[in-house]
Image (cartoon, rainbow, N blue to C red):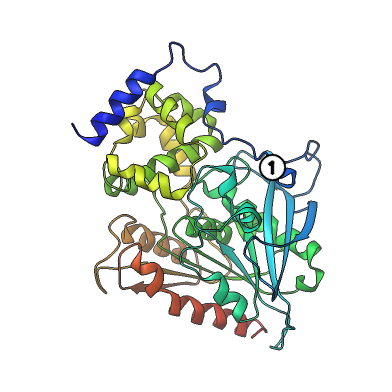
Amino acid sequence: MTLFGVLDRVLTRRLPLEPPKDPYAAILPTPIDNDDFFLTPPGIEDLAPGAVIRQRTTRGLVPRPRTTLHQFMVGSTDARGLPAGVTASLLIPKRPWTGRGPRPVVAHNVAIDSLGAKTTPSYRLVHGVGADLPPVMPLWLARGYAVLVADHQGPRMSYSEGTMAGHAVLDSLRGMTVVAPELADSPVVAYGYSGGAIATTWTAQLQPSYAPDVRLVGAVAGGTPTDFTMLLDTMNGTVAAGLLGAASIGLAREHPEMVELFGPKALLLASWVKDMSVFPLALGGLVRMRIEDFASEPNPFDSDIARRVIAANRPGADAPSAPVAFFHGSASKMIGDRFIPEAGVTALIEQWRSKGADVHYEPVAGDHFIGAMTGLPFVLRWTAGQFAVNGSG
């Protein structure tokens, strides 16, 4: 029997006699129970996006004696336009900035790619060890940059949802200027890889309309998923299916109408994995499941609900005003990214360029994992260049 067959048999045996009374609630993450800082208080409806709700200066579990760590929560807006509380961490080197202009800021969007509330970067900075892959954050700090790490999946851990992620990053950057007024005039470059690239791409696209007050001078993203329909061809039924399934749960958390597409086994499975981190979710790909096997209808991705949600999470409708750079594991260099299609990135680049955006593309050697490392020299050069032309460096 295959691993998928084993999983299907286990789910069949564990199915409850009655469906959950609130299927949507069954897929939401368990709230953090050991640190009230991360719990959104009532009454945030009247707050302006970016308003600081609470803040603290703290220490991480891993000592950073040369860095000050601030954490804060800001008011933000979810994908449905409703108020949401978003947490973020700000790391500032203690040594004075000696370059030109104000100290630069990197909005470092971690590839969270997880479903549990305790897997956010800010929580892990103080209660665990974060999974910052590739490990770029120390390189930013070594250059004297301040690093803003937004918990960009939002309060519901909406993995892969673009609008929530973009709003979370932009509102965290707004709050940063209150927590650290000395950074109010600092140029900002957003960076992210894989799941972090989703946040970076949407930060760039949404900034002109949602947060024109944020001084975003560039965005650089690698291994960028741009179109969920492409991922169905490259990830569904493969060893990457665990993360694809997690991304589907993340989308449903921000778009509750998607829960209609979850069959009984999907709801049960979602309730089992709803608090997992990226590593066990990725290992779930060994089952090589196909999402439609657990859906409430034979072709869930052809439904009106899925089409609307997928379209809403496909960047390109609006162009960024800040320069953008993409890098991607390319077959033209060596190997190529077989899970996140290069064609999706190049299509987005052409779409943005047609709208007048300044977009650079850097194909790099490697697959989705190796490309994260081979692209780093380009990322560091490009980021430093953007700061330099904007008066810092």
Query: From the viewer's perspective, is residue 311 above or below residue 51?
Result: above
Which quadrant: the C terminus?
bottom right
Farthest residue to the left: give it.
1
Q: Closer to the camera, 330 or 27?
A: 27
**Residue holding disc 1:** 34
Q: Closer to the camera, 37 or 159?
A: 37
Which quadrant: the N terminus?
top left
Which element type, helix, strand or loop, lies under badge 1? loop
Is residue 91 visible from the viewing direction of this image? Answer: yes
Q: In the picture, residue 30 is in which quadrant?
A: top right
Measured from the top left, where is residue 137 in percent x and y? Answer: 56, 70
Measured from the top left, where is residue 153 in percent x and y? Answer: 57, 48
The total number of labels drawn is 1
Direction from residue 343 to residue 126 in the image, left or right: right
Direction from residue 357 to residue 334 in the image, left or right: left
Is residue 211 visible from the viewing direction of this image? Answer: no
Mark 1 Cα-neighbour bin, 10 Å: few <14, some 14–19, many ≥20: few
| Residue under the image location 44 percent in, 75 percent down | 376
Direction from residue 295 to residue 183 in the image, left or right: right
| Residue under the image location 51 percent in, 28 percent down | 257
Query: From the viewer's perspective, is residue 229 above or below residue 329?
Result: above
| Residue under the image location 40 percent in, 64 percent down | 350
| Residue under the image location 48 percent in, 30 percent down | 271
Measured from the top left, where is residue 262 in percent x and y? Answer: 42, 26
Measured from the top left, where is residue 239 in percent x and y? Answer: 28, 47
Q: In the picture, residue 327 is in which quadrant?
A: bottom left
Amino acid on which disc 1 is placed? Asn
